[in-house]
Image (spheres, rainbow, N blue to C red):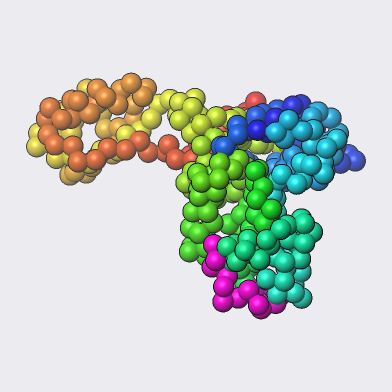
């Protein structure tokens, strides 16, 4: 478990973090969301013990990240946009070197497994300097997993990856969380990718936490007046079928602006009394819509 309490960080005249507090539950996958410059990377560096805070405390599985930084680093794996690889060495030699740094026993078996997991078998003996951005990212992920960390920090892990590489990384995140019960905190600006793996979200703006919760909790707070897009066959017409006036209509589709989420069941019940409903979905309830709703709400504060 990660506990962040009243963390602040001052860089000379710039206040990067302001009184940040939250908890990441053990075994969860938490998404850290915010625009560039919101403090996400600084926060990750403080949490994994690499950077000291100006105030406050971070504990990782009960250990103080500042006072017991060496122990914290040993239980954490951190992937940043700078992968920390040696480009004049082969991919496998990089993994062997870092395995020696960690003092790993049976390193060859572990390296073989990670090379296979990230589909690097055909490239492992080539120099990293010849790798594509995506291959470096995959090798970087393999590196941070060498010592079997219990907590994983991923800062923009899919940057530079092609669609197949993105799906591989998302699959591995889910696999690590499910099979190894790994606690994962992942930062990304591609929100659709976060929604595929995360069960909890933390939203940052200008060095502050402005919102957090599950997707369902945040939707209920910021999207209380939903739009429902319906595909149906209404023989008598959309306007006569319900007590609700559709905003947009075509022969078999309509969009209704509702006053509350409780209206959804009433609308669908009335529609099914007059025709056949094929599909209904709430629009604007995806993670990206939530993100912009939160930013808009806090922009005016």
| Residue 81: x %, y % from top left | 69, 57
Name, please, the residue furthest toward the right.
12
Q: Residue 121 colored magenta?
A: yes
Q: Would residue 41 appear left or right of 187 to someone viewing this image?
A: right
| Residue 111: x %, y % from top left | 64, 64
Q: Residue at x 60, y 58 (%)?
A: 159
Q: Residue at x 60, y 76 (%)?
A: 123
Q: Is residue 232 visible?
A: yes
Q: Would residue 113 appear left or right of 53 to someone viewing this image?
A: left
Q: Residue at x 73, y 61 (%)?
A: 99
| Image: magenta residue range | 116-131
Q: Would residue 181 appear left or right of 206 to someone viewing this image?
A: left
Q: Residue at x 76, y 69 (%)?
A: 86
Name, please, the residue furthest toward the left.
235
| Residue 58: x %, y % from top left | 76, 32
Is the N terminus in the top left, top right, bottom left or bottom right quadrant?
top right
Q: How many marks?
A: 0
Corner quadrant of residue 120: bottom right
Q: Nearer the viewer, residue 50 or 67?
A: 67
């Amino acid at each position: 478990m990660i506990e962040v309490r009243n963390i602040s960080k001052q860089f000379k005249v710039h206040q990067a973090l302001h009184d940040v507090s939250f908890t990441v539950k053990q075994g969860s996958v938490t998404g850290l969301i915010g625009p560039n410059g919101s403090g996400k990377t600084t926060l990750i560096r403080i949490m994994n013990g690499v950077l000291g805070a100006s105030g406050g405390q971070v504990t990782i599985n009960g250990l103080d990240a500042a006072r017991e930084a060496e122990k914290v680093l040993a239980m954490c794996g951190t992937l940043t946009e700078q992968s920390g690889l040696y480009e004049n060495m082969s991919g496998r030699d990089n993994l062997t070197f870092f395995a020696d740094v960690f003092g790993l026993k049976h390193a060859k078996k572990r390296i073989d497994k990670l090379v296979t997991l990230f589909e690097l078998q055909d490239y492992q003996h080539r120099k990293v300097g010849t790798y594509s951005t995506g291959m470096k990212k995959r090798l970087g992920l393999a590196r941070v997993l060498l010592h079997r960390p219990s907590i994983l920090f991923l800062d923009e892990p899919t940057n530079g990856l092609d669609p197949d590489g993105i799906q591989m990384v998302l699959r591995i995140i889910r696999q690590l969380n499910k099979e190894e019960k790994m606690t994962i905190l992942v930062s990304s600006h591609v929100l659709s990718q976060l929604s595929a793996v995360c069960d909890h979200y933390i939203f940052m703006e200008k060095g502050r936490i402005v919102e957090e919760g599950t997707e369902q909790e945040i939707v209920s707070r910021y999207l209380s007046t939903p739009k429902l897009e319906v595909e149906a066959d209404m023989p008598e017409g959309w306007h006569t079928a319900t007590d609700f006036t559709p905003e947009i209509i075509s022969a078999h589709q309509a969009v209704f602006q509702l006053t509350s989420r409780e209206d959804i069941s009433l609308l669908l019940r009335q529609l099914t009394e007059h025709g056949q409903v094929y599909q209904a979905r709430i629009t604007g309830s995806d993670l990206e819509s939530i993100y912009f709703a939160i930013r808009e709400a806090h922009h005016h504060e």
